[in-house]
Amino acid sequence: MNMLNRISVQVGIIFFIGITLVVGGLSLIQYFNESEELSERSEKEAVQETFLIAASIAEDVHYHRVFQLWKRLSGLIAFVTSDEFPIQEFAVVDDAGMVLVHSDPKAHPVMTAMKVSEAGIIWHGDTLKITQAITDPSDGRTLGHLLLNFDTASIHEEIEELRDEILYLFLMTLLVAMLLATGVSRRLSAPL
């Protein structure tokens, strides 16, 4: 009988460790996949917003209509920006590298030089920086660049919530695994 108890305890422990490893591995995979998907989806949305804004201001950039550009950009950004993914800063620079409009006009006055990197996406801490070329719709030549900085702190908050949720589910699964392992162990040690 003593040998049967040891075997049943060993089977219970192996059962518990097996379930823990499988559920833990699946939880990690789910966490990494969902957090990566969330970042990619947010980046894609920001790129689409930037492209649409750049297309809508092309004519004003072409004719250097600074006031209309400021008015249009302020309105568009208020309309496009969601509470989840707000725009922190914006700038429009013409093809000569001169500022046409900036969200901080005191730091970057109109018609002052501003260095612009090539069009692209840069993640920098809690900020997603997107530089989009503004092209002439008639001939496709580059008229300037639109620079938008998005606040991505909400993405990190969502990832933390996801981590907490997966951790909670993992702990609940461990509790169920312990109960199952105890049940299997008792069942094996019970006389036939």
Image: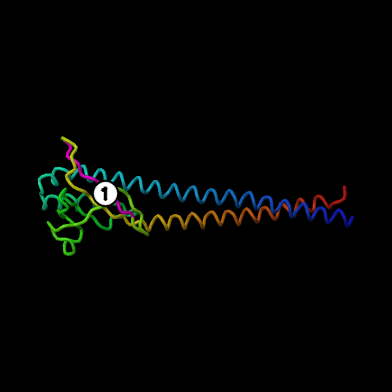
129 sits left or right of 2 in the view: left
Q: Nearer the viewer, residue 32 or 117?
A: 117
Q: Residue 167, percent across and down?
A: 55, 56
Q: Secondary structure at mark 1?
A: loop
Could you say where residue 66 lies in the image, as x and y percent from the top left?
A: 11, 52
Residue identified by numbered label 1: 118
Would residue 136 be counted in the magenta stretch? yes
Q: Kindly identify the residue that appears in the image at 56 percent across and 57 percent down.
A: 168
Question: Foreground residue, 152 or 192?
Answer: 152
* The residue positioned farthest toward the top in the image shown: 138
Q: Residues within 10 Å of mark 1 (few under 14, many from 20)?
A: few
Residue at image location 64% in from the left, 52% down from the top: 21
Which residue is rendered at x = 63% and y = 49% of the image?
A: 22
Q: Which residue is nearer to you in this view: 63 or 31?
A: 63
- From the top left corner, tell me how far across and down residue 74 is, in percent: 19, 53
Q: Does 28 sit left or right of 2 as displayed?
A: left
User: Which residues are drawn in magenta?
Assistant: 128-137
Say which amino acid is labelled 1. Answer: Glu
Residue sitting farthest toward the right: 1
> Considering the image in quadrants, where does the N terminus appear?
bottom right
Q: How is the image coloured?
A: rainbow
